Image: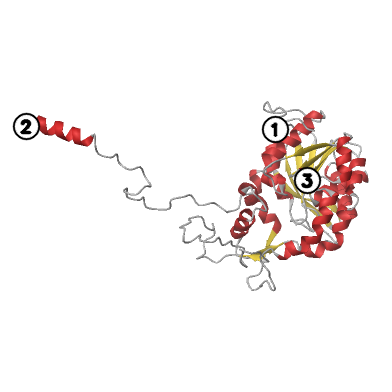
Amino acid sequence: MSSLERKLLMKSLGSTLPPMPPPGVPGRKKRKGPQSRRKDYSLLPWSDYFSSAKDLKVDDDDIFHIYECGSEGPVVFMIHGGGFSGLTWAVLSATLTKLVKCRTLAVDVRGHGNTKTSEEDDISADRLARDIGKIVSTRYKDETAPPIILVGHSMGGAIAIHSAVKNLVPSLAGMVVIDVVEGSALEALQSMQSFLKGRPKQFQSIEYAIEWVTRTGQIKNLESARVSMIGQLQPMDQNEMAEGSSPEAGTSMDGTITEEGEEAAGETENHAADTETVQQPYTWRVDLSKTEPYWKGWFQGMSNLFLSVPVPKMLLLAGVDRLDKDLAIGHMQGKFQMQVLSNCGHTMQEDQPQKVAEAIATFLLRHKMTEALSGFERLFPSC
């Protein structure tokens, strides 16, 4: 057989052979190394989102830790919920100041975060509301009081309302309350102690805590959890052990989560912490179970108080079912704007910071409190 005939034969045979299998199917050698990307549960610095963090001395014994972003425009004053810290607003703050001309100020309220005060256990609605007024007057005492837009989440929303009703912020220009309604809040309090008992009492490391809070869905946005979770926790002594813990189903004492069949399925997602190194255990900064005496005081009568505040108001909700009777009537009467955002849990500002920032920016523009940056326009009407 000549060389030409041999080439023609090989060409004809080649056209009938099956193609080479694509990567990852039987018949092709598997690549070495992990087949999927591991998630990163390490901390992100607050400085990636806020321009400054400082201690603000209000009284001789009261020093409040605040985070700020932006240099001009009205001040969006952010008040976190129970157990959280000012870091819960980090991603939202950085996003909002890129959409409209404004400044943001996020505070660690009394008994939370890095704030150091006398009588830290007194977190009554009246005490926290007076704190907000003092922080505003102290921070802006050297300048003409700028327009203040109070933004509060959960307990922080209730405190924003109490501050506004008592006229503790004279330059108040608007208010945004995030996912807190009197009726549903009071109803939820009945099961709050059971929920708190279901949380791990300690975590092997901050990375384990970030993994736990995201994989349980309490914070759905990993980026936000990586910067904010440290505000809810504090280091504990290595010899200090949590006693009498009743972790949630599927969680262990160190806050890890076990999924059925995870190892058998060859999952590569794991903890960012190196288990071979000595790790610093963490526990909660605030024992929320001990704050029960103040719960009803935060929320009782809140709906009517909210409706009575004589400034533009917006209520952001994760579900329309959270609206109680008084607010439903008030909304139909046009006393406030309401926006329901999808794919959010209770911690809306962390789950969907972009959507919440756009909603707040739209609110500010609608009421002519500021001007848009970078061509931002209202993306949806506020109802």
The tag on residue 112 is none
- Disc 1 target residue: 99
Colour mapping used in the image: secondary structure
Residue drawn where x is 63% and y is 47% of the image: 221
Residue 24 in picture, x, y percent from top left:
38, 47
> As shown in the figure, which amino acid type bears the numbered disc 3?
Asp
> Mark 1: few, some, or many residues within 10 Å (few <14, many ≥20)?
many
Given residues 15 and 221, the one toward you in this image is 15
- Disc 3 target residue: 321
Secondary element at tag 2: loop
Q: Residue furthest left?
A: 1
Instruction: Tell whether 18 sits left or right of 144.
Output: left
Q: Earlier in the sequence, mark 1 or mark 2?
A: 2
Residue drawn where x is 78% and y is 46% of the image: 321
Residue 123 in picture, x, y percent from top left:
85, 58
The tag on residue 2 is 2
Given residues 289 and 186, the one toward you in this image is 186
Instruction: Tell whether 84 sits left or right of 291.
Output: left
**Vertical side of 279 occupied by 31: above or below:** above
Query: Which callout, 1 or 2, points to the residue nearer the camera?
Result: 2
Distance Cα–Cα, label 1 vs label 2: 75 Å
> As shown in the figure, which amino acid type bears the numbered disc 1?
Leu
Q: Is residue 224 visible?
A: yes
Q: Is residue 71 visible?
A: no
Instruction: Tell whether 218 sits left or right of 80.
Output: left
**Vertical side of 197 occupied by 349: above or below:** above
Secondary element at tag 1: helix
Q: Earlier in the sequence, mark 3 or mark 1?
A: 1
Image quadrant holding the C terminus, namely: top right
Residue 43 in picture, x, y percent from top left:
60, 53
Residue drawn where x is 66% and y is 69% of the image: 237
- CB under 8 Å between discs 3 and 1: no
